[in-house]
Image (cartoon, coloured by chain):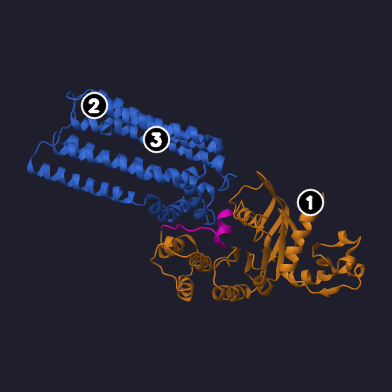
Amino acid sequence: MDNMALEISNLSKKFDGFSLSNISFKVEKGSIMGFIGENGAGKTTTMKLILNAFERDGGEIKVFGLDNIQNEREIKQRIGYAADEDCLCIGSTLGAHAKAYAKIFKNWDEELFKKYVELWDLPLKKKLTDFSKGMKMKAMLALAFARRPELLLLDEPAAGLDPVARIELLDILRDFVADGERSVLISSHITSDLDKAADYITLIIDGEIAESEPLDILEEKYALISGSIDDLRGKEYELVGVRKGEMTFDALVLREKLKLFPGVAVHTPNLENILTFSIWGRRERRRKA
Amino acid sequence: MKNALLLLKANRIMRQDILGKRKYIFYGGIILMFIGMAMVFIGFLLGKDSSDDFGSSIVFLIQLQFFLIITFIFDGFIILKNGIGQSNQRIEDIRNYFFHLPFEFSDFIIAGLISFWQIFLLSTLISGVYYAVSLFFEIGEKNKGLVVLASILSCVAYVFFLCAFLVGAFCKKHAWKAVNGIYVLSFVLFIAGIFLMGFFEGQITFAEKLSPLCSPAGFLLLLSPVPLSALAVWILLKVCKKGAWYNA
């Protein structure tokens, strides 16, 4: 338990037309957890439940071993948050936010804030309404890092960032967790970024956790196969997901089931393959059901 | 309490944003009030009859300021709506700004009530100062009964304000129409108090007509919302302690 920054067990939340069911995963201290899934899968809702933005229907969320509702203030002092939506008062300036945050957050580091402001060339006196989407995200990241959090929750931080800033962000995140005490939960659609930076991956599909494993184990767990449609005959149900052409197919399969598909070409899947084939497979099974 | 005060500091940014151009009205009101204050004291120094001229001006300006503050505090009220569950873009913006900051929902309730107490305290302070001044210059000795009646109406209005919080806290999602109704009713009562005085124009001074808070009874009644709102805080905390930022 002491080694866990975040521990979610059997979390559930129902909305009209959508529900999170039995969400369980853990984020170890000193690690980066990539949180992936298609739009509307429940990534943002899960992050907001961690911050007690929504009332959960069931389950448990422990941050640094503390219940997130009973210890809301303390936990939020130790969490940094940045999201692909306006979590800032956009009629105000970044400088005004920094001034307010300096009073609110006990671990506020003004020098660190200035460092990011200089790195990303952020204007302090310009209204946030005049910021581009990427600049707003950089502003949120600067404010999040300057809190000196122990856990960073980043919801689609790469959205709107230019490639240079994205690479810089990945480097910053690696440095951030390097001391083994701080952790990151990051959701992103840009899976190639997570391939480079994440230690663990949690895959959420339709409000349910499909996978939560170390990235290397996840990549070893599956194989990407391709071959002739005839190779699939009668065995399609053994696949995680498949994409068929007229004569050929590509599919994701558990490595332990590779022996069922002799003669097919086998590749190591990347994160994008695992994500997309898992979603396609789930959709296909739902359609058949 | 410390956290609620911190929240009020965090709220300054949001307040500026919400106020927008209305801030000029608000700050204009403050400037007018000080001009009025200056006028009345210059008037006293010049030996003018304060009850009919400069006294009337200052009381009028105080009342104007009171309504400007009410307008301003609408924003505090908007923030309190957060706990009541009304949804519109502005409320969403407020929630998005606050929910990840290190505050509990109870801090929000206390901060909201502190911002309302500011009105009571400010009004009490202004009324108290004016009352002391009026006693000194023997203003407003006629028709004390009407002044008390208007004061009572004003206080009933305050009580309705607090009832609005309670209803909102207990019923959450579905209470908003009732809260709006009570809020409007409280204003109607307050303004009714002022107009009631208007019917007796000529029997009382202009200063008394405009300032139901300037009588001894009014001054005492003005303090009554303080224990009542303390009770409201206690109940709200009991109800909302485990509240989430969104009532989804």
Name the side, left or right, on which A26 lies relative to A182: right
Estimate the x, y position of residue B209 in percent, counting from the top left: 23, 30
For the residue marked with disc 1, what is the amino acid? Arg
State whether residue A129 appears in this view. Answer: yes
State which chain is coloured orange: A
How far apart are the alpha carbons under marks 2 and 3? 25 Å
Asked which quadrant contains residue A129, the reply is bottom left
Instruction: Determine contact: label 1, label 2, CB under 8 Å.
Output: no
Choose mark 3 or mark 1, whichever is in front.
1
Name the side, left or right, on which A274 lies relative to B69: right
Shown colour of chain B: blue
Disc 3 residue crowd, few under 14, some 14–19, many 20+, Cα 10 Å: many
Task: Indicate which disc residue A287 carries.
Answer: 1
For the residue marked with disc 3, what is the amino acid? Pro
Asked which quadrant contains residue A239, the reply is bottom right
* Magenta-highlighted residues: A72-91
Pointer 1 indicates a residue of which chain? A
Choose mark 1 or mark 2, whichever is in front.
1
Task: Indicate which disc residue B198 carries.
Answer: 2
Q: Circle 3 sits on which residue?
A: B225
Estimate the x, y position of residue A266 in percent, counting from the top left: 84, 74
Instruction: Determine contact: label 3, label 1, CB under 8 Å.
Output: no
Element assignment for label 1: helix
Name the side, left or right, on which A27 lies relative to B227: right
Disc 1 residue crowd, few under 14, some 14–19, many 20+, Cα 10 Å: few
Disc 2 residue crowd, few under 14, some 14–19, many 20+, Cα 10 Å: some
Element assignment for label 2: helix
How far apart are the alpha carbons under marks 1 and 2? 74 Å
Pointer 3 indicates a residue of which chain? B
Q: Specify whether disc 1 shares its chain with disc 2.
A: no
